[in-house]
Image (tube, helix red, strand yellow):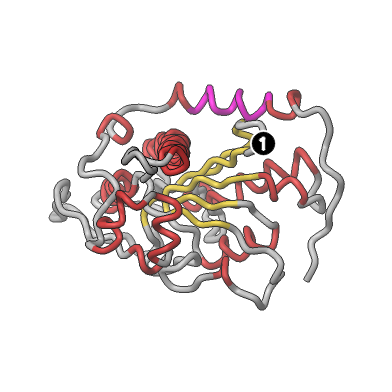
Amino acid sequence: MSNDGQPCQCVSARSSAITMGLDLHVNYMRMATKLARYALDHDETPVACIFVHTPTDQVLAYGMNDTNRSLSGVAHAEFMGIAQIQEKFGAQNTAIFKDVTLYVTVEPCIMCASALKQLGIQKVVFGCGNERFGGNGSILSIHRDSCTVPQNKHELIPGVLRKEAIMLLRYFYVRENERSPKPRAKANRKLDVSVFPPMNWGLYLTRSEFEEIFGASKIEYFDKSLDLSTHVDWSLIDCNQDIFFQNLKVECELFSLQVAKKPKPQTISS
């Protein structure tokens, strides 16, 4: 408070900045969620991501799980996007990643989290946790690790559109997957659309980190393991996203034409 009892301008500005930042993250996560829906409609595990060039606020790459089509267990969404970036800037040129934010519907697995850290990604924003293989807090915290490329430590923002990411996975797991090595009968599985597990923010952030990212007004969410939103945006996960995907492809293809010059090469250190 100021001397006249009015809120300090610095506090108000900080609150506005947090709100604008969260709105931006939600907007890009909506794009990743639509892409995950596209993957689901094309018989893939509905996990998807987009890579955003932060300084110019442009999407430069996207990725979807491709494990069913490729029959490869390492064909994860993050690697598809990384390959697109490397095609633009060169496989040994990692400088671009320090200006890139990854938006992915599910927490990167340990393998992908390690790759992102070695490349020097700036920030990772994800929807739901990966309780079996998560590399950003659920199982291991690769982004905080000091063993591999210790100078690379990126910011983490979890829980954005978490319920939508969970619902897409539920949609997938009640379907039959004929490409599975051991297909399981799922006819009797029921789709739960109303109950969601608690969000354990402490796996990913300290209480002070949570407040820094989401603001003091939302600290109750951390303390009570609540989701950021009380509802599910069904329009994101129940609609066909074929047109969106075609537009996204064009946007990513145009990115290289809008970049004045490539960043100076920076090789990966061990």
At a point 25% along the width and 57% down the height, the residue shown is: 220
Find residue 31 and report its image quarter: top left
Task: Decide: is 212 above or below 234.
Answer: below
Q: Which of 269 and 185 is in front in this view?
A: 269
Q: Quadrant of residue 243?
A: top left
The boundaries of the magenta stretch are 245-254
Q: Is residue 252 magenta?
A: yes
For the point 37% across and 36% down, which residue is it?
Answer: 41
Dominant secondary structure of the magenta stretch? helix
Give the quadrant of the N terminus: top left
Residue 117 is situated, as x and y percent measured from the top left of the image, at 64, 62
Expressed as whole percent of the image width and height from the top left, the position of residue 193 reads: 17, 46
Q: Residue at x 28, y 47 (%)?
A: 163
Q: Is mark 1 on a helix, strand or loop?
A: loop
For this view, does 175 lie left or right of residue 265? left
Q: Which residue lies furthest to the front in this view?
A: 3
What residue would you read off at disc 1? 55
Q: Residues within 10 Å of mark 1 (few under 14, many from 20)?
A: few
